[in-house]
Amino acid sequence: MSNYKDVLTFAYESEYENAYDLPNKNKFTTPKIYTAKGDLSKRWYVYFSFQNPDDPSKLKRVTPFYGKVNKFKTKEERLEVLSVYRRTLIQLLKLGYNPFEDNTSLFEGLKKNPELPQPTPAEKPKKTKTPKKEESDDQPKIAVAKAFEFVIELKEKSLTKTTVQGYKSRVDFFLKWLKKNQKSVVSIDQLDKKIVSAFLNDVLMRTSPRNRNNYRTDLSSLLQTMEDNELIEDNFVKRIPVLKSIPKRNKTYSEETTEAIFNYLEANDPILLLFIKFISYNLLRPIEVCRLRVKDIDINKRTIQFKAKNSPLKTKIIPEILWKDLPDLSQMDGELFLFTPDKIGGEWQTTINNKRDYFSKRFKKVVKDHFDLGEDYGLYSFRHTFITKLYRALAKDSTPFEAKSKLLLITGHSTMGALEKYLRDIDAELPQDYSTFL
């Protein structure tokens, strides 16, 4: 099977210029020349798009053709070679060339056609005047901010508001950094690996490896969308390595500390106590509790529905230990949020992240400062604490696998592997005393 390079290289060497009709002109875009803004240290090539074989209603970018052009050391030489490649490729497309199919018959026909010049060794091109701009037209220049704005709008169609807001926040910070440190970068095609690496290094020096990696992940996702939509040629962020980072872990509370906190909150902050009980007894994450509305609790079935981390909608039972602490919800408007700053069941118009941050700060002020708890303790620690407590209680009268199988239904982890990793991370599963083996 003759590939793209075989056909185009042969056609370049023969450089036929016969005129043909263009029966399938809507199947591809006119080939263009990319000159990297005249930078000879970068790759120059010819690029175009062709009808996507998987979705004929769309065009798909074909792998750019470089040939031998980047061996030449002057702009004039490279433009001469690329101009020939471009004209040749146009002729191939007129003849019916399809980059996604076997073109052997086309290739053989070109070799046998007596009207076409026979292949001859390629010679170093002569210096010529630079082609007119329209013949070596680069890709459209799109402003950096406009490119990011476009892909974020696409993300909004498939992702949650919280996720999109995270993208926007990091992009805003990145654009401010560009404006301050890379003033010459105006269009998205000027962005490169060196610039993004410098930005990530700056984030690393200011914050942490984990935060730097989060910026890298989001920028890579956005640039991949740009590549998919042909705003850029390549998502170079994928080639920037991920740094090793040690994640911070919320420690579990001792039984004595847990009891002391619950007793203190019962007298001083009942709303925060109920918030914590949803984390402790229903094993929800803090942000999942913040999303709850009155209508999410089925009074008859004693179940709760919520948007979980690993699924769009999850249902759990409400255990009796939590159910008896809930107020009467039957007369409340189902659209009201279950938790607000001053009451159970009310309006609270702010973002979900602000709600989570509010309760985290409230917990610090009311509980952590009072009990002099370190930064390793937080709201999430209650989830770790009670999952550990549940697992060890279940493991007393059953095998580890049986205990995990029962626990899987309670915690809501998507797989047994995910649960086992979680249990290892929080040190819930400990070995028996191994002194006899020593």
Image (cartoon, helix red, strand yellow):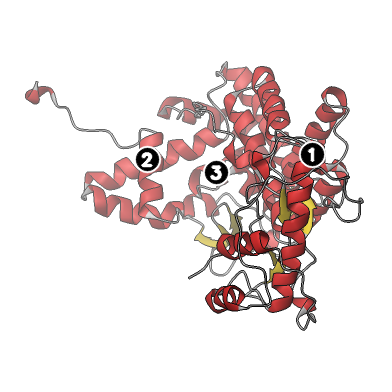
Look at label 1 and name its amino acid: Lys
Q: Quadrant of residue 235?
A: top right
Place of residue 414 in the rendered image (x, y in percent of width and height, measured from the top left)? 45, 56
The circle on residue 382 is none
Toward the viewer: 268 or 35? 35
Q: Residues within 10 Å of mark 3 (few under 14, many from 20)?
A: many
Distance Cα–Cα, label 2 vs label 3: 17 Å
For the residues labelled 1 and 3, the Cα–Cα distance comes to 65 Å
> Measuring 50% from the left and 36% from the top, which residue is drawn there?
382
- Residue 255 versus residue 67 in the image, above or below: above
Res. 423 mark: 2
> Where residue 221 sits in the image (x, y, percent)?
66, 47
Q: Which residue is mark 3?
A: 279
Between 385 and 11, the one nearer to me in the picture: 11
Picture disc at residue 75: 1
Is residue 16 visible to us here?
yes
Rate crowding at label 1 as few (under 14), some (14 to 19) or many (20 or more) other CA atoms within 10 Å.
some
Q: Earlier in the sequence, mark 1 or mark 3?
A: 1
Name the one closer to the observer, 24 or 253.
24
Residue at the spot x=58%, y=59% of the render? 5
Say whether disc 2 or disc 3 marks the residue closer to the N-terminus.
3
Q: Amino acid at mark 3?
A: Ile
